[in-house]
Image (cartoon, grey):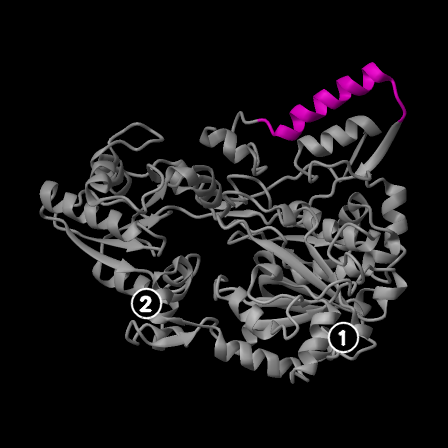
Amino acid sequence: MNRRKLLSLLGMSPAVLAGSPLLLADDKKKKEKGAAAAGAFKVTALNPRGLPPPITLVPMAPRLATLDGKTVYLVSDGFPGADAFLNQISIWFKKNMPSVTTVYRLKAGGFADDDPKLFAEIKAKGQAVIMAIGH
Amino acid sequence: MGIPSAPLVTKAFKDLAILNAAKRGMPHERICFTPHPVWGKTPEEVRAYVEGPDPVTGKPLMKEIVDALTVPLSDDEKKSGIVSVSVGPPTFTDTADNLQEFYLNNGYTDFLPIILPTEEKVDAMLKATSHKPDEVVGKMAAGAYPPWSYNVRQVAASAVMAGCRPEYFPIVLAIASSGMASLFSSTNSFAFAMIVNGPIRDKLEFNYGIGALGPFAQPNATIGRAWLLMSKNLGNGGIPGDTYLGSLGNNLNYNNVVIAEHEDASPWPPFHVQRGFKKEENVVSLFRGLGVVPGQVARGSSANENVQFDYQMSDLFSTFTGFFGALIIADPLVAVRLKEQGYDTKEKLIAWLYKNTTQTVKDYKSRNYAYLFEYPQALQGREPYATWYKLPDDAVIPHFPRPESFNIVVAGGQTNAYPQAGNLSYGVSVSIDKWM
């Protein structure tokens, strides 16, 4: 499924997803067609869905002009294999972009938790982050 | 942080990564993907992944990562502001058959037929509580997502859909007010359970006798189902690939493990009294974990004239992950026998189980859950994990982090002395009476 289709599942407004009709609209057409054909007695039922919070768009951080001479933090969220994968990325940088300094860190806390101490360190000493998430 | 980042995610979590980034305000986040899984691979295999293509885009992975950090932002990526999210109109009108199809096709159900939440049925449900239809009940999320909120009327819709009678509604509201969903986005296929205590068990005719955990009574069946439907409809849980990642899934999710305690047959105080409530109060307590297993597989049996349920349970728990606790579901025959063997309080049994269910540090460190969830806590100095990780491999430590990891409830029909046990940890107890 492409990103636009996926995001339409969120019910995000068309202003953000221009041209992405909500799935509900598709279903509405189908049900209207079905009801007309059947000509059956109609009932009204409640939409059981709760209220999702609005989405506050966060502008992404400005990108670097180049990674040359920069320090890139390689951060594992703790899922198995992330450490080994980031180690190979570190090796790749040494081989292909030797001016880049890489620093490996395991994020403390649960996988969804912030690690304020680490994030402060990265902000003070690093210029970019590659964060490995997954299994 | 204000620093360019390149998230690196395995392909299996593509939809989750994109959607969760969007929910958190970055619908265009530059996510790079690797083949899945990356664990258990040799260094050569991992190197090939690094030097190979992103399996989603087909482009060289490392070029994508470098580009993610260095290519200037597009206008979309710089956007700020508030974006509304729609879940459709407040009501739907159509034939009953078409609405059944519509609810099913839009993910509002558990793929079993539902009772349509017509205005009449919802109104009847609303009469079973003193709370106003528009009162906000709580917030719920089925994982690390921004939570959804909901009111009494929306809870009533799920209660109707599940087949609840109106008199069950205060229990459903109590569960909803906890904010705890019965679905969770983890790959671990979690299971959930509830214990119902108090006079309401008899008033509503819960089954806590023969077949206590089975499909033999309407409140046991439908209130558990309502928890699932609320988790989907009010907490946006249970969308495979987005808010649900359980690899195998869990059959217990259909209506959860609903346990009405057999308070009169128990030799110990009921569960809610242990949690500080009065015996005459009506309370629902919620648990989360991995599932329930039968006690028959452990050492000892009721055929043994000197059956030792304490050793049997300890044996059983050694297969559990310590991250979640152990919920002992004891038939009254088991509970009474344990009392006869000297465990005149639940606390005594728990103390014995905590002391005698052990593991070596080497075994502990080899467990997936320890590495994934507890080692990061050890790094933050949290006990007992910080101490455990400093001990030698041959040191013997408890299997569970603390005595509070154990809970005991009594239910069953006394047709045989079999316990069951859940690798389930206690979450919260909520007053039902407050929602009457």
The quadrant where residue B291 appears: bottom right
Discs 1, 2: same chain: yes
Image location (x, y in percent) of residue B156: 80, 50
Q: Amino acid at mark 1?
A: Ser
Q: Is residue B414 visible?
A: yes
* On-image quarter of the N terminus of chain B: bottom left
Q: Residue under mark 2: which chain is it in?
A: B
* On-image quarter of the C terminus of chain B: bottom right
Marks 1,2: beta carbons within 8 A: no
* Vertical side of A85 occupied by B265: above or below: below
State the residue in front, A122 or B290. Answer: B290
Mark 1 to mark 2 CA distance (whole Å) = 39 Å
Q: Amino acid at mark 2?
A: Lys
Magenta residues, start to end: A21-41
Q: Earlier in the sequence, mark 1 or mark 2?
A: 1
Image location (x, y in percent) of residue B149: 66, 53
Magenta stretch: includes residue A110: no
Q: Give the residue displayed 29% in from the left and 75% down from the top.
A: B390
| Count of marks placed on residues | 2
The residue where tag 2 is placed is B362
The residue where tag 1 is placed is B266
Main SS category, magenta section: helix
